[in-house]
Image (spheres, helix red, strand yellow):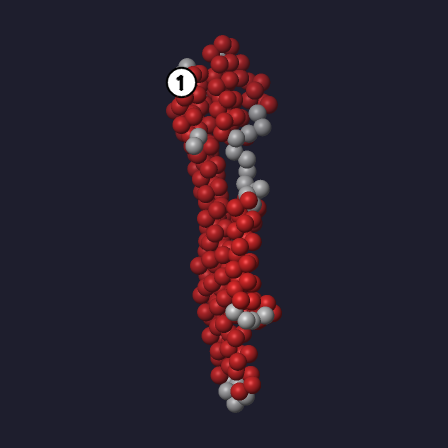
């Protein structure tokens, strides 16, 4: 569980609800059905128009990474790679065949199988880098769905505010409705700007950081697999791979 994300969400709620209470308004002043429909539904609609269904569904699947990111055990992976290199030096690459079948990490298992099959190091690198780049680009497309929502939401907030003011202008003959109408108009602006800066954009950036971490981990796996293929000393492999760990 990412404690910083939880703290961030909590403080965002405090900033909005605490701020409006401190300003002397009630929490109910933040609710307006028309503004919600214009901003939230409109933002989702805009994202759907620009995004492929497969990418949008993937974005929803990776959203939980904001709070519970996939585990990346770099030190355990280094220990595993060094162990594989020792087995390869003692028993040959065929000694890794059983380990390839038992490996839980699909990416590492693919690299091991390429080793067992006697694939040349450069061919292994090319195959695994294609896999890495394809996965990274697809994940980044998912993260960009939230970034795009962060771009659309403030604009739709302004549209909602203008539409609200238009309704106010139509009721100028009734002064008792002006104050309520103007307040409701600006609720849409709050929805747009707050959702963009306190939710959509931070979520997109957090996902991109998580994806970069996963890509760095896979790059480390590739370097380890290639080093084994080239017959490097296990101690040298460990020293090199530890450079990936901060």
- Please give left or right for residue 176 compared with residue 232 in the image: right
- Residue 98's quadrant in the figure? top right
> How many numbered marks does the figure carry?
1
Identify the residue position indicated by label 1 in the image. 236
The residue at 52%/90% (across/down) is: 173
The residue at 55%/29% (across/down) is: 105
In the image, 121 versus 240, the foreground residue is 240
The residue at 52%/30% (across/down) is: 73
Can you say whether 208 is above or below 176 in the image? Answer: above
Q: Position of residue 119 (x, y in %)?
A: 44, 21
Q: Position of residue 20 (x, y in %)?
A: 54, 67
Q: Position of residue 177 (x, y in %)?
A: 55, 83
In the image, 94 versus 8, the foreground residue is 8
The residue at 46%/45% (across/down) is: 208
Q: Position of residue 158 (x, y in %)?
A: 46, 69
- Please give left or right for residue 130 compared with residue 11 in the image: left
Q: Is residue 231 in sight in this rendering?
A: no
Mark 1 neighbour density, 10 Å: few (under 14) some (14–19) many (20 or more) = few
- Quadrant position of the C terminus in the picture: top left
């Amino acid at each position: 569980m990412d404690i910083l994300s939880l703290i961030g969400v909590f403080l965002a709620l405090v900033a909005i609800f605490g701020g409006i209470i401190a300003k002397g308004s009630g929490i109910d002043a933040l609710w307006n059905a028309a503004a919600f429909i214009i901003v939230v539904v409109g933002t989702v609609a805009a994202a759907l128009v620009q995004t492929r269904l497969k990418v949008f569904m993937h974005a929803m699947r990776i959203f939980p990474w904001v709070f519970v990111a996939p585990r990346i055990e770099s030190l355990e992976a280094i220990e595993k790679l060094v162990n594989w290199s020792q087995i390869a030096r003692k028993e040959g690459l065929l000694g890794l065949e059983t380990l390839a079948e038992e490996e839980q990490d699909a990416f590492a298992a693919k690299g091991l199988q390429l080793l067992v099959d006697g694939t040349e190091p450069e061919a292994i690198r090319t195959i695994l880098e294609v896999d890495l780049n394809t996965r990274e680009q697809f994940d980044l497309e998912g993260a960009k769905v939230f970034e795009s929502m962060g771009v659309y939401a403030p604009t739709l907030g302004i549209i909602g505010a203008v539409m609200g003011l238009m309704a106010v202008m139509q009721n100028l003959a009734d002064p008792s409705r002006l104050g309520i109408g103007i307040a409701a108009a600006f609720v849409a602006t709050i929805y747009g700007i707050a959702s963009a800066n306190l939710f959509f954009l931070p979520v997109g950036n957090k996902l991109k950081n998580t994806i970069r971490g996963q890509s760095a981990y896979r790059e480390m796996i590739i370097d380890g697999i290639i080093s084994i293929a080239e017959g490097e000393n296990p101690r040298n492999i460990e020293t090199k791979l530890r450079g990936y760990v901060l």
